[in-house]
Image (spheres, helix red, strand yellow):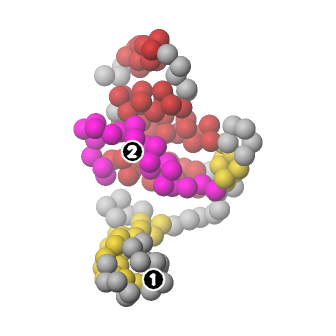
Amino acid sequence: MKCPFCSHDDSQVKDSRPTEDGAAIRRRRQCEGCGARFTTFERIQLRELTIVKGDGRREPFAREKLERSVAIACRKRPIEQIRVERLVSAIQRQIETSGENEIAAKRVGEMVMDGLKALDSVAYIRFASVYKDFAEAKDFEDFAGNVKDMGGE
């Protein structure tokens, strides 16, 4: 594993343990070049997944992008990090077990919306504002009104 600090090619694993949800192995490593310590995560990948964007572009599925999107929606909300990680892992498992090698970005967005709706109504509205491309305050009002009608906070 390449060191993120000095780019040395070799590092030594100092500690390995499963993550709380059991979906990955967390490894603490130490660079043999500069001695810095860093953490890596190893996850099962059942197949190469491709995301098909709305304009037809294709790109490899990147869990990091999914994690970042969900984390931004949940920022400054009283949501435990483990719940966010479980949501991301559940979405990734759902994508991987779908049997498809390609999945529409729109479908992934819907999965995130469904997960956030159950997790936190504010995070759900935040994600929706980007996903549904809200253009003005009225869009927020209408959407938030629908969330409230559905029994949201």
Q: Position of residue 10 (x, y in %)?
A: 44, 86
Please tell me which residue is depicted at 37% across the width and 88% down the height of the picture: 32
Instruction: Answer whether residue 117 is visible to the viewer in this image.
Output: no
| Most foreground residue, 113 or 130 | 130
In the rendered structure, the answer to whether residue 44 lies left or right of residue 84 reads right
Query: Which residue in the protein does label 1 denote?
Result: 8
Residue farthest to the left?
78
Instruction: Answer whether residue 57 is visible to the viewer in this image.
Output: yes
Query: Which residue in the protein does label 2 denote?
Result: 71
Q: Residue 3 in magenta?
A: no
Q: Gap between marks 1 and 2, in whole Å?
A: 30 Å
Please tell me which residue is depicted at 33% across the width and 47% down the height of the picture: 83
Within the image, what quadrant is residue 71 found in?
A: top left
Which portion, as a residue range, is magenta? 60-82
Within the image, what quadrant is residue 18 found in?
A: bottom left
Q: Position of residue 99 (x, y in %)?
A: 66, 54
Q: Is residue 83 above or below residue 131?
A: below
